[in-house]
Amino acid sequence: MKSPPVGYWINGVLRLLVGGAFVVAGALKIADPAKFALDVSHYRLVPHALVNLVAILVPWIEVTAGAFVVAGIWLRAAALVITSLTVMFFAVIGSALARGLNIECGCFGTLGGKHVGLVNLAIDATLFLLAALLARRSQDWPAKEIFREAGAQDSAPPREASPKAVLQTERGSHPSVCGDPLR
Amino acid sequence: MSAWRRASLPQALGIVLFGIGAGLAGNQISPRGLPLMAPPKPTEQAEAFIALDQAKQLWHGGAAFFLDAREPADYAAGHIGNALNLPAQSFAQHFGDLAPRLTRASLLILYCDGAECELSHRLRESLRQLGYTNTHLLFNGWTAWRQAGLPTTAGGQE
């Protein structure tokens, strides 16, 4: 069996970076929900009554999306969720900085400094770019199809077209397969 | 729009809903779970706070202990002169070191930093549970004290 194309390994690294970061960030918050609720309240963006609900749900959405990305399940959708979360976090952190709030970020524990600052914005922007790249690339290199393609090349006679071209041809002729990379 | 792209939005929604379900379930079974709706914010009575001028007089007269509720690193970076560090977030770990210096009748001025800081409130509650009720909060303590040009010190607690 041939090795998957380089793009597959790039996707793997991206998945570990982006998904892993969100799993860790979410898990840190889940470990101490009261602390995260306090951090959320300090941003003064959520009505007090809803602070706990946000503190309960956001970390689990982070962990779920991160785990889906790491596992490569519904990859593009999970990367899109993470992209949306990073946009939201960017707006929240940016508004805190604009208002001059001297508060804890509540992002990755104490990573990036104890108080919210430009470092947190930079980390968030980096994750946004990586997640967007992953969402974009996951169209080109869905894991199952790559392996299927590599396996098919192993057993079938060699074809002239490149793996990517074959992949795109197969997508065109089997939209149902392309619609769900896991099938 | 390709079938794959069309499938992404419902899948993304599914991931979010899964996260919400896991969050609600996890919160339900976790011993550290929170009430879904936050209870009304406890409001400190006005008499819980002490004015800066009054705090200054107490400091000069040596009639009160000043307790810094922030983390040791923040305390070491700068604190009210002669203040003791009793971090609200690790109260149990640090209280034993300070207990011999305090009595339940001691006048304690608690502070942290920033109008939004709740560490001094948490410290007050922790102390109250142990019977230390003669406590007052210095609003926006560290910043207010520093901006007033009152005596400060840097360095860790001895």
Image (cartoon, coloured by chain):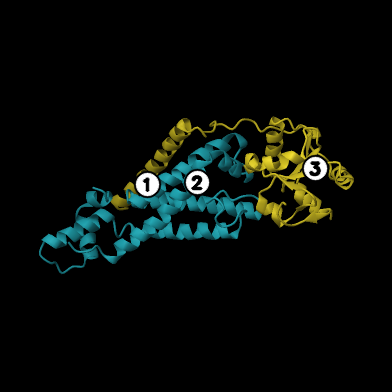
Chain colours: A cyan, B yellow
Looking at the image, residue A5 lies above or below residue B2: below
Q: Nearer the viewer, mark 3 or mark 1?
A: 3
Say which of B21 and B34 sits in front. Answer: B34
Where does the N terminus of chain A fall, quadrant-wise?
A: bottom left
> Residue beneath label 1, please?
B9
**Alpha carbon of mark 2 to alpha carbon of mark 3: how far?**
35 Å
Across and down, in percent, residue A55 comes to 53, 40
**Which residue is at a point 25% across and 53% down the rendered structure image?**
A144
The numbered disc on residue B65 is: 3
Task: Tell me whether marks 3 and 1 sit on the same chain.
Answer: yes
- Mark 2: which amino acid? Leu
**Alpha carbon of mark 3 to alpha carbon of mark 1: how far?**
59 Å
Name the image quarter holding residue A153: bottom left
In the rendered structure, the answer to whether residue B72 lies left or right of residue A58 reads right
The subunit letter for the residue under badge 3 reads: B
**Which residue is at a point 63% across and 44% down the rendered structure image?**
A42
Q: Nearer the viewer, mark 2 or mark 1?
A: 2
> Residue beneath label 2, please?
A28
Label 3 packing within 10 angstroms: few (<14), some (14-19), many (20+)? some
The subunit letter for the residue under badge 2 reads: A
In the rendered structure, the answer to whether residue B153 lies left or right of residue A53 reads right
Q: Earlier in the sequence, mark 3 or mark 1?
A: 1
> Residue furthest toward the left?
A157
Task: Tell me whether marks 2 and 1 sit on the same chain.
Answer: no
Q: Secondary structure at mark 3?
A: strand
Name the image quarter holding residue B23: top left
- Mark 3: which amino acid? Phe
Say which of B21 and B140 sits in front. Answer: B140
